[in-house]
Image: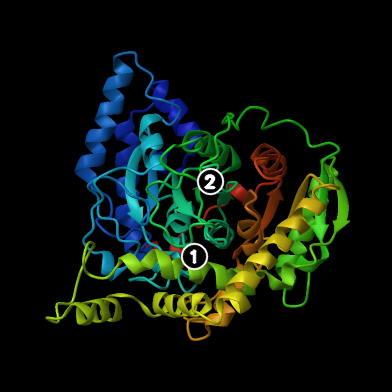
Amino acid sequence: MELYRLTAHELARMIRGKEVSARDAIESLLKRKENVDSKIDAYREEGVGSKSVLVDADNVDAAIRRGEDPGPLAGVPIARKANLCVKGKLTTCGSTILFPFRPPYDGTAIERLKEAGAILYGCTQMDEFAMGSSTENCGPCTKNPWDQSRVPGGSSGGSAAAVAADEAIAALGTDTGGSVRQPAAFCGVVGLKPTYGRVSRYGLIAFASSLDQIGPLTKDVEDAALLLSVIGGHDPRDSTSLDIDLPDFREGLDEPITGLRIGVPKEYFVEGLDGEVKGAVRKAIDELVALGAEVVDISLPHTEYAVATYYIIAPAEASSNLARYDGVQYGQRRDSGALLGMYEETRQDYFGDEVKRRIILGTYVLSSGYYDAYYLKAQKVRTLIKNDFDEAFKVCDVIVTPTSPTPAFKIGEKMEDPLQMYLSDIFTISANLAGIPAISIPCGFSGAGLPIGFQIMGRPLDERTVLQAAYAYEKSTTWNERRPDLKWITKSS
């Protein structure tokens, strides 16, 4: 049995039951990474510190021998995106400007993983400062495990690719406009964006503070529920963290969905949606109906404004958040001999093109004379989008849509056309603007053998219903059991 193929809940159960050791699990993953990652490039920074993770594994095994329970993730290796702070570990958000920043503390989500017995296994690739939909805004570009010529999605593409290729048991990503769900769909794994405020953002290096949320990328829905139950909960160090009870989302996961009302918005099945994606999602809806759910036709009339709204609000917040990277306190600097010159040259030389584009756009919409016309109006439209969801949830329990309008596209295909790249997130952005939970799960494959995902969105703080619907569908199909065979790697190795 190859331990790297197991889910987190399977592996944790076996480690606690002494069927296998945490060291066995780590060694299995290290060997898998050695055989696979040179072609996928899922990991970055210092990659995986084999000595340190083996020490961590030995500590878990020793605790179990002493009769102690290390926690629900006992000995499970979890990867993390490069914008999540881990004490003493290189954390650069995929940007040259932050090199060689090493945080002096653990972020809350990381802290809680460790408390649950997980082993922080490695740092994954991402688009620079999470600004991208393809994990091409970094170096080197991460490849989709299903097809080396295609992107894994972004900005959490490294985390999604690592899970899909069995280089990680599970991983953390971040979702500002779909950056967990879209790569999950492209790579054929599960990606969950929790309600805004459900998971603390303390230790997440900010892109757009009112939109960012940490979420898990996993091999199945139960793992997503398990990780959310670990990393969620109130944190006084984050002023946006919700002070509410955190349930164990695995409880009741297998309850039947008879009578569940599924909203299907007409605005998400429009011209431009790939025919194979549309067909797969429609079949997924039919499967949910066969399991006892009921379909309700709904409308989310302000959906057409979501992309424009997002690309005003997110860059505006980014231009403020990234102002701190000027060569003074963090990372690298260009020393021109003059203070203003240092600022200009540092930002010019060490920010990538996409980050510069969004900083310029954000600064523009916040500038005098344009604030009311752009930023203020976008915030008003954001309220209208949230109101659309509030009205829809009066007649349905969850909303089902495609995750992405197409399967994974070719590497380089959209790099010269930012607008086309931005439209990759057209179906995911609204959930971030409204602050609601959403999950992407596999629902089929294209004729070219590429994964297709569909999205389930729920009421604020109702991750339980979202996870139950996803779990019911997953258990009635076999899509999540498929893994890329990676023959293209073994043949060229």
x then y, percent, for residue 456:
70, 51
User: In this orientation, which residue lies closer to the viewer: 444 or 389?
Assistant: 389
Label ID, residue 219: 2
Residue of label 1? 154
7 to the left or right of 478:
left
| Whether residue 151 can be seen here | no
Which quadrant of the structure image shows residue 330? Answer: bottom left
Residue drawn at x 41%, y 47% as measured from the top left: 168
Q: Give the mark count.
A: 2
Which quadrant of the structure image shows residue 108? Answer: top left
x then y, percent, for residue 297:
88, 57
Q: Amino acid at mark 1?
A: Gly
Whichever of callouts 1 and 2 sits on the residue coming sooner in the sequence is 1
User: In this orientation, which residue lies closer to the viewer: 309 or 83?
Assistant: 309
Q: Amino acid at mark 2?
A: Lys
Residue 297, placed above or below residue 308: above
Residue drawn at x 26%, y 22% as measured from the top left: 62
